[in-house]
Image (cartoon, rainbow, N blue to C red):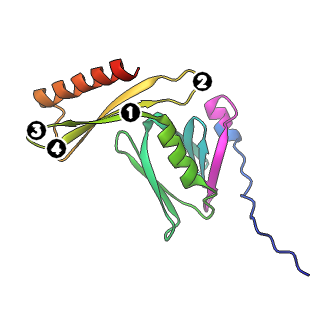
Amino acid sequence: MVAMAIFKRPTRVDFSGLETLLGAKPQVLAHGVGDADLVLAVTREELALRRDGQWSVWRWERVAGGSWNGDTSTFRWRTMDNERFDAVLTEENRVPEAFRERVLASTLVQSVVDASPRGQVQVIGRRDLSANPQTHWYAVPSGGADLNDPHTREAVVTETDRLRTEYF
């Protein structure tokens, strides 16, 4: 009788460079690997990417969202500043699930403000996932909404103040 391995262990990764950058041992929840020493790590407090031997780190309150494309083995994400990144992974090892959980864990509240005559603005309260969390507020326009319009700006500030009072 031949035994067959049902579960494949993730590739071992040396996170020492990340530990040096963060100043503490990272609490890695999931990690994916790609070619040429690429590593995408989902940690408790941040998303980290090692490419070409260099680590880049985004705290969860700064990560807007992401997606996994199984056909191309590509994980894509964007920041609250709408910067876009991607990583082709040969092993994804629960990265998409852990990523989604961390984004949701850092999102406290979302509200939509009408920005007539065009578009809307999403007001989002996010918190960092450290031991002493701070709340960060974002206004994300869509549909042609202009944050420089005085009426839109006033509506966003009013809604942000309401959310701060009501929820925090």
Residue at mark 3: 116
> What residue would you read off at disc 2?
131
The answer to the question of whether label 1 and label 2 lie on touching residues, with beta carbons closer than 8 A, is no
Mark 2 and mark 3 in contact? Answer it, CB < 8 Å: no
Q: Looking at the image, is mark 4 or mark 1 nearer the viewer? A: 1
Q: Which residues are magenta?
A: 19-37
The extreme front residue here reads: 166
Give the secondary structure at mark 3: loop
Q: Residue at x 17, y 24 (%)?
A: 154
Q: Mark 4 = which residue?
A: 119
Q: Are marks 3 and 1 in contact (CB under 8 Å)?
A: no
For disc 1, the marked residue is 109
Name the amino acid type tagged 4: Gly
- The answer, for residue 77, to whether it is visible in the render is no
Going by the numbered disc 3, the residue's amino acid type is: Ser
**Counting residues from the N terminus, which is met first, the one under dot 1 or under dot 2?**
1
Q: Which of the numbered marks, if any, corresponds to residue 163?
A: none
Local crowd at mark 3 within 10 Å, few (<14), some, or many (≥20)? few
